[in-house]
């Protein structure tokens, strides 16, 4: 199989990831529950993983890195923990449902208001719309770093500057960029950064989290076991415990720890350069094929390594199935949990076929995928 | 049971705080180890850093200016 669905999850991980998970399965006790060798093995690796994430993502404090099961959970914690009735929120058409649905629910159940910056047919927003949509009760900007559908990246530093100028909380979904593109919370003015461990961070599924700027207070979303302050009736208020009730996915986090070590050794810039080179190679090969429509903004390399396309008027799921069954190429068809952007692109009915490239893909795989598209389009 | 002696016990609000302290002390060559929080300090659960009494100055200097979620210093028989 040629795996080109890395925006959904990176299937191929560095070898050290599986080794670390297996080692943890045979040695980890429960983090923060006791101080015997097993419990401490877990606690040490989990803490070091917080340090590695803080370093990678520009979070000032390792103990402000909170683990969750994935980005969706992290975004729910951030959005529901910071916003409520009477608040106005700015977001964009590029968002995944992991941002959209918590915002819609905030509207429906708590009476918050949300305005979305519209995307054009290439998936670009007009940054001046932030000023135009600003209201006296605007409380936050919630947006993705890069579209999971077309790969377009938002200028996070620019939006962060806007948020800071207007005293807004800035929550960013880095699901498509953490580990594969330089992210610096401090430099970009991000208050809460949500990430998942299993995509470009190359760790196991079931890992993710939030990086929280010091001083940002999020309401507790779940409460329970903490390993500390047992006789308090209220769940402890200090981070990371504040937002981490219950046993963590220590085994998964051990894998993420190893993946972060791999990323440190290779370098985020080198990973980005490799993935974008593959994306460019594929884009260059398919963009001129008659009957192929490519979506997104390819004017800059500041983007996620994604090429979304359609072939003639064929249903995207049929093309993806043809790619899988005839050519052994794994892509993702359909709507990609990105309903607003599909509407903006005009692909609500057809969907699109998304090719997303990862660090372990090769030029030969890219060429084979482009040739398959060419044949399907004939 | 082992004989108890007077020691310095540093407590934290979170497990992450205890881990940060252990890592810092190992790096700085400060003697000590993680122990369960003695029940004479609190009947809550949790981890503490246990060190010889004379290590207090080194520890205080090491944590100065660092974001370690430290709850308190105690001198107790452990």
Image (cartoon, rainbow, N blue to C red):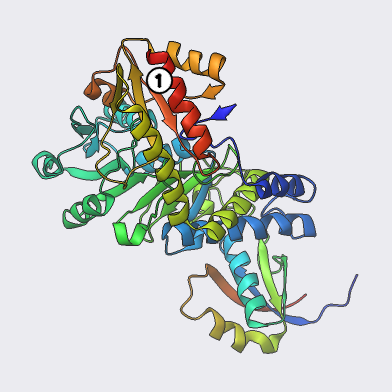
The residue identified by callout 1 is: A374
Which quadrant of the figure has residue A84? top left
Q: Residue furthest right?
A: B1
Q: Is residue A178 left or right of residue A339?
A: right
Please state the horizontal and vertical placement of residue B54, each as a whole percent of the image. Answer: 68, 89
From this viewpoint, is residue A180 visible?
Answer: no
Label 1 resides on the chain identified as A
Which quadrant of the figure has residue A289? top left
When the figure is inspected, residue A266 is found, relative to residue B66, above or below; the finding is above
Q: Is residue A251 left or right of residue B69?
A: right
The residue under the point 73% across, 81% down is: B7
Q: Is residue B69 left or right of residue A189?
A: right
Pick the quarter of the image with the N terminus of chain A.
top right
Please state the horizontal and vertical placement of residue B24, each as a whole percent of the image. Answer: 60, 75
Q: Is residue A59 left or right of residue A191?
A: right
The residue under the point 49% across, 81% down is: B64
Pick the quarter of the image with the C terminus of chain A.
top left
- From the viewer's side, name the closer residue of A180 and A141: A180
The residue under the point 22% across, 45% down is: A139
How many other residues sit within 10 Å of disc 1, few (<14), some (14-19) or many (≥20)? some
Secondary structure under the numbered disc 1 in the rendered image = helix
The residue under the point 33% across, 54% down is: A191
From this viewpoint, is residue A324 visible?
Answer: yes
Please state the horizontal and vertical placement of residue A225, each as a whole percent of the image. Answer: 62, 45
When the figure is inspected, residue A46 is found, relative to residue A290, above or below; the finding is below
- From the viewer's side, name the closer residue of A160 and A285: A285
When the figure is inspected, residue A183 is found, relative to residue A348, above or below; the finding is below
- From the viewer's side, name the closer residue of A347 and B40: A347
Please state the horizontal and vertical placement of residue A348, each as a whole percent of the image. Answer: 29, 16
């Amino acid at each position: 199989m040629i795996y080109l669905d890395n925006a959904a999850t990176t299937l191929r991980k560095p070898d050290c990831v599986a080794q670390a998970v297996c080692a943890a399965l045979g040695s980890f006790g429960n983090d923060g529950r006791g101080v015997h060798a097993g419990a401490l093995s877990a606690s040490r690796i989990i803490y070091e993983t917080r340090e590695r994430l803080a370093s990678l993502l520009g979070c000032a404090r390792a103990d402000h890195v909170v683990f969750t099961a994935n980005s969706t959970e992290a975004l729910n914690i951030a959005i529901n923990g910071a916003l409520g009735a009477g608040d106005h929120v700015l977001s964009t058409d590029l968002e995944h449902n992991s941002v959209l649905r918590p915002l819609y629910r905030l509207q429906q159940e708590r009476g918050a208001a949300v305005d979305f910056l519209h995307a054009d047919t290439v998936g670009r927003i007009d940054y001046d719309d932030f000023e135009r949509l600003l209201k006296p009760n605007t409380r936050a900007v919630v947006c993705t770093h890069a579209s999971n559908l077309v790969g377009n990246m938002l200028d996070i530093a620019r939006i962060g500057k806007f948020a800071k100028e207007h005293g807004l909380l800035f929550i960013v979904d880095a699901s498509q960029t953490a580990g594969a593109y330089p992210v610096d919370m401090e430099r970009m003015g991000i208050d809460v950064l949500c990430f998942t461990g299993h995509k470009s961070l190359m760790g196991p599924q079931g890992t993710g989290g939030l990086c929280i700027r010091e001083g940002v207070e999020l309401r507790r979303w779940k409460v329970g076991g903490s390993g500390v302050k047992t006789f308090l009736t209220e769940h402890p208020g200090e981070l990371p415990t504040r937002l981490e009730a219950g046993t963590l996915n220590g085994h998964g986090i051990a894998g993420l720890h190893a993946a972060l070590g791999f990323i440190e050794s290779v370098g985020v810039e080198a990973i980005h350069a490799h993935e974008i080179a593959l994306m460019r190679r594929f884009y260059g090969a398919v963009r001129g094929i008659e009957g192929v429509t490519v979506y997104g903004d390819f004017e800059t390399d500041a983007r996620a390594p994604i090429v979304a396309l359609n072939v003639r008027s064929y249903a995207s799921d049929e093309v993806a199935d043809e790619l899988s069954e005839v050519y052994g190429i794994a892509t993702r068809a359909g709507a990609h949990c990105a309903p607003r952007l599909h509407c903006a692109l005009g692909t609500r009915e057809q969907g699109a076929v998304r090719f997303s490239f990862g660090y372990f893909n090769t030029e030969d795989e890219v060429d084979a995928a482009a040739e398959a598209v060419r044949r399907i389009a004939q | 049971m082992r004989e108890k002696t007077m020691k310095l016990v540093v407590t934290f609000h979170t497990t992450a705080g205890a881990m940060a302290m252990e890592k810092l002390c190992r790096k700085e060559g400060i003697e000590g180890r993680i122990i369960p929080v003695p029940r004479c300090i609190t009947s809550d659960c949790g981890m503490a850093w246990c060190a010889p009494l004379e290590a207090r100055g080194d520890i205080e200097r090491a944590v100065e200016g660092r974001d370690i979620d430290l709850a308190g210093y105690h001198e107790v028989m452990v």
